[in-house]
């Protein structure tokens, strides 16, 4: 196993699929490497059967672009790759050009913490096709995963109905970066903090933690374990009470809580990590209140997700804090967002853009051509609709929005009182022009955005479909291009 310092370097240019480099080489050999193109990153379906997603991962994208370079050992590795004839896969002159590569792309993106919908361009990348192509894999990796986790976190926080949710998933996360990225995205999605100390250091996320069953098991008795913990950390006493008998554990916590008061400290609470959480929390609350610990919180963990939390809420379980691990950081019920990165336009010699469209037997996989932007329409009551439009064509003042998959479903925006475009400049000529807000501000943005969605869009199951689609003239042009492409292919 190589040390992490070797794996996570200042440049991650080889964090890509081989076919991206193969295509880049092909562009170089055919003299097309500098063709000016437009690529767009989007996703096709909302995850978890939900009604919205929360965008995350842009900061990671910008760090990647800002530090992108091929190091000498990267080039040496590529030089050793062989084709099927056992000869070098890449021309040394191509590798030399990679060593001298400096990005010149422009990138526009939707800020993190924004609610987004299928088929909307989350990022628009413009520039030489070779550069745009080399970015594809990494951008999808960053945005797909973090958006998925931020969305899962937002759903869990919605279910908690105002009670804090902490991300406790590092031990079950998919590797080092999976754990760090999940902690970051979960905080953007609304979690109050994390157990991941490295994420706390790197991102400024509040860190929280109690103790494990091993602490209790080390001592001869549970009361002794709680007492020793209280002596060691009197200002952080949340006792895990289910190592042996849960309600007896609550009584032992109360005994040590009484001792803590004689020392000038207070029992913070107890944690339940197994069993019938609704029943046990109700009974534990009775015991705590009867003993005079009305302010002691009950923390619940144990493979929680949004539906189990919602069920606990309907049962009036007196749980004040939720620790969510595995099913959050692994997006347990949907392990991938399914984002895509497609060529949408090529700039002609006269400076105009020629749209490109990808066909499919499935209408949901047909790409949207053009240099796209998203305009969000609002009323005083919240978000009304999103219109995807081509920035090279005039947008009507009150556009008709057409669903990309079901074109008979349309929405007029006549009642909108204001609107704004979602994608903003973040990179120009290869240089970052956007300063990330603090992570806490991204989290606040998520909360504001979600509050602007109708509750029917936010509900966990069978949500109302938020009107997000193509501006009518873009819909017609897409249909024309599809018919033309199918005609030329026959």
Image: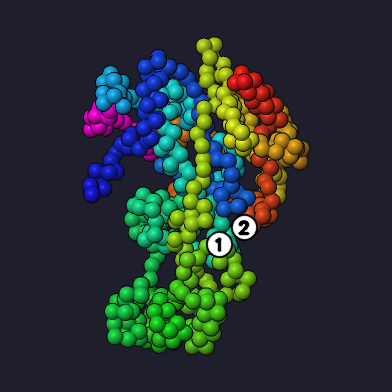
Q: Image height check: is 193 above or below 408?
A: below
The answer to which of 83 and 398 lies nearer the viewer is 83
Residue drawn at (68%, 29%) of the image: 475
Quadrant housing the C terminus: top right
The answer to which of 248 and 239 lies nearer the viewer is 248
Tell me, yes or no, whether the highlighted magenta stretch contains residue 71: yes
Tell me, yes or no, whether the highlighted magenta stretch contains residue 333: no
Assign a secondary structure to mark 2: loop
Find the residue positioned furthest to the top.
350
Please indicate whether residue 227 sits to the left or right of residue 154 in the image.
left
Q: Which residues are magenta?
A: 63-83
Where residue 387 sits in the image (x, y, percent)?
Answer: 66, 36
Quarter of the image holding residue 231?
bottom left
Where residue 161 sits in the image (x, y, percent)?
Answer: 59, 64
Please indicate whether residue 199 sits to the left or right of residue 408 in the image.
left
Residue drawn at (44%, 33%) of the image: 136
The tag earlier along the polypeptide, 2 or 1, is: 1
Q: Image height check: is 107 above or below 443?
A: above
Q: Which residue is mark 1?
A: 306
Mark 1 is surrounded, within 10 Å at the Cα level, by few (under 14), some (14 to 19) or many (20 or more) other residues, namely: many
Where residue 33 sits in the image (x, y, percent)?
Answer: 41, 19
Assign a secondary structure to mark 1: helix
Q: Which residue is mark 2?
A: 460
Do the numbered discs 2 and 1 sit on residues whose CB atoms are within 8 Å? yes
Residue drawn at (49%, 47%) of the image: 336
Residue drawn at (44%, 62%) of the image: 325
Q: Is residue 357 shown to the viewer in this render? A: yes
Mark 2 is surrounded, within 10 Å at the Cα level, by few (under 14), some (14 to 19) or many (20 or more) other residues, namely: some
Q: Image height check: is 5 above or below 387?
A: below
Please indicate whether residue 421 sits to the left or right of residue 425 in the image.
right
């Amino acid at each position: 196993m190589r040390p992490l310092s070797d794996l996570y370097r200042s440049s991650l240019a080889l964090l890509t699929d081989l076919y991206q480099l193969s295509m880049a080489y092909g562009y170089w050999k055919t003299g097309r490497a500098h063709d000016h193109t437009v690529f767009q990153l989007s996703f096709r379906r909302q995850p978890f059967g939900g009604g919205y997603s929360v965008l995350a991962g842009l900061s990671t994208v910008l760090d990647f672009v800002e530090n992108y370079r091929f190091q000498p050992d990267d080039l040496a590795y590529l030089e050793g790759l062989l084709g099927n004839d056992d000869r070098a896969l890449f021309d040394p002159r191509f590798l030399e050009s990679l060593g001298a590569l400096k990005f010149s792309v422009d990138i526009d993106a939707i800020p993190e913490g924004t609610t987004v919908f299928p088929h909307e361009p989350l990022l628009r990348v413009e520039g030489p096709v070779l550069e745009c192509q080399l970015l594809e894999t990494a951008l999808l990796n960053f945005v797909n995963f973090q958006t998925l986790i931020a969305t899962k976190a937002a759903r869990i926080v919605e279910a908690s109905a105002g009670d804090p949710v902490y991300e406790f998933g590092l031990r079950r996360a998919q590797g080092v970066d999976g754990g760090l990225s999940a902690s970051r995205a979960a905080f953007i999605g609304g979690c109050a903090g994390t157990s991941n100390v490295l994420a706390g250091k790197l991102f400024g996320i509040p860190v929280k933690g109690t103790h494990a069953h091993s602490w209790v098991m080390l001592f001869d008795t549970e009361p002794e374990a709680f007492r020793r913990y209280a002596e060691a950390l009197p200002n952080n006493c949340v006792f895990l009470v289910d190592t042996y008998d849960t309600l007896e554990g609550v009584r032992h916590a109360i005994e040590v809580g009484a001792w803590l008061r004689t020392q000038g400290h207070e029992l913070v609470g107890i944690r339940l990590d197994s069993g019938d959480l609704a029943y046990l929390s109700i009974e534990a609350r009775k015991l705590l209140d009867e003993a005079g610990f009305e302010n002691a919180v009950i923390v619940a963990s144990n493979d929680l997700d949004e539906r189990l939390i919602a069920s606990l809420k309907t049962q009036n379980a007196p749980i004040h804090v939720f620790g969510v691990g595995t099913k959050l950081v692994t997006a347990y019920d949907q392990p991938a967002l399914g984002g895509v990165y497609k060529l949408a336009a090529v700039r002609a010699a006269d400076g105009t853009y020629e749209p490109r469209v990808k066909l499919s037997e499935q209408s949901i996989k047909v790409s949207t051509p053009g240099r796209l932007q998203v305009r969000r329409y609002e009323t005083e009551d919240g978000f009304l609709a999103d219109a995807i439009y081509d920035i090279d064509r005039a947008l009507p003042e009150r556009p008709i929005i057409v669903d990309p998959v079901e074109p008979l479903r349309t929405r007029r925006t006549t009642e909108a009182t204001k609107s704004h475009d979602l994608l903003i400049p973040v990179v120009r000529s290869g240089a970052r022009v956007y300063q990330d807000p603090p992570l806490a501000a991204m989290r606040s943005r998520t909360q504001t955005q979600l509050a602007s969605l109708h509750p029917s869009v936010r509900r966990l199951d069978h949500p109302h479909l938020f009107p997000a689609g193509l501006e009518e003239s873009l819909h017609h042009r897409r249909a024309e291009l599809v018919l033309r492409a199918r005609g030329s292919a026959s």
